[in-house]
Amino acid sequence: MTVMKRGLALLAACAVCSLGSVSVQAAIEADAGWSRQTPPGITVGVGYFTLKNTGTKTRELLKITAPQAAAIEIDRTSTDAQGVTRMWPVGKLEIAPGQTVKLAPNGLHIMLRGLKQPLLPGQTVPVTMLFADEPPVTVVLQVRALSDVDGVGPAAGAHTMHDMPMGHDMPMGHDHH
């Protein structure tokens, strides 16, 4: 084989190899992740972050995992005119092209169930989400002290166990565990 043919063969082989390593750019972006400290003995935590679909197709969230939790689900919280706060599981989360979804207190959020240990200020919790037709997306939750949530203390949108309805463990539309 001549030097020219060897060079062309090597170039072709490199091109084929590089095709196999093309990374897929995620259409879903996740950022601004945070969580609250959990009191001793509490095995449920909460997580907040922002999701944005920069792609051209609607993306459906299929599963959420974190090493610190046995299961994760997406819930919604709202407070009625009488001041009663209710929380319920969301059966499905789809994000349309160009849409931004903010998971925040008194709205959509994730519940980290079966925590293996309490969440302490300064810790981080990596949360990985699997969307249909999408590479995994990870957001890191920064754990904040109860006294330092958004700089306004724990009363601003904090979950307290006494104001949550007991039907919280209803099955979801998808297996988010």
Image (cartoon, rainbow, N blue to C red):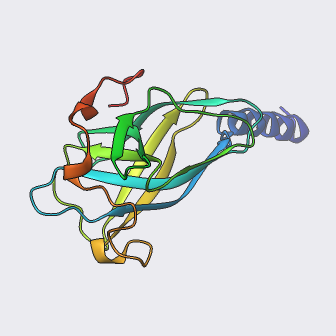
Residue 101 image position (x, y, % from top left):
60, 46
Q: Is residue 99 left or right of residue 146?
A: right
* Whole-percent x, y for residue 104 in the image: 48, 55
The residue furthest left is 41
**What residue is rendered at 35% in x and 41% in y?**
87
In this view, the residue in front, 76 or 79, is 79
**Picture quarter with the C terminus:** top left
Above or below — where is 33 with respect to 4?
Answer: below
Q: Say which of 12 and 75 sits in front.
A: 75
Is 99 on the left or on the right of 145, as rendered? right
Number of numbered discs overlaid on the protein picture: 0
Left or right, 133 with reference to 89 = right
Q: Residue at x 44, y 73 (%)?
A: 150
> Quadrant location of the N terminus?
top right
Q: In percent of the image, x 68 and y 30: which residue is there?
A: 58
Q: Is residue 49 above or below residue 133?
A: below
**Can you tell which quarter of the image residue 21 is in?**
top right
Q: Quadrant of residue 24?
A: top right
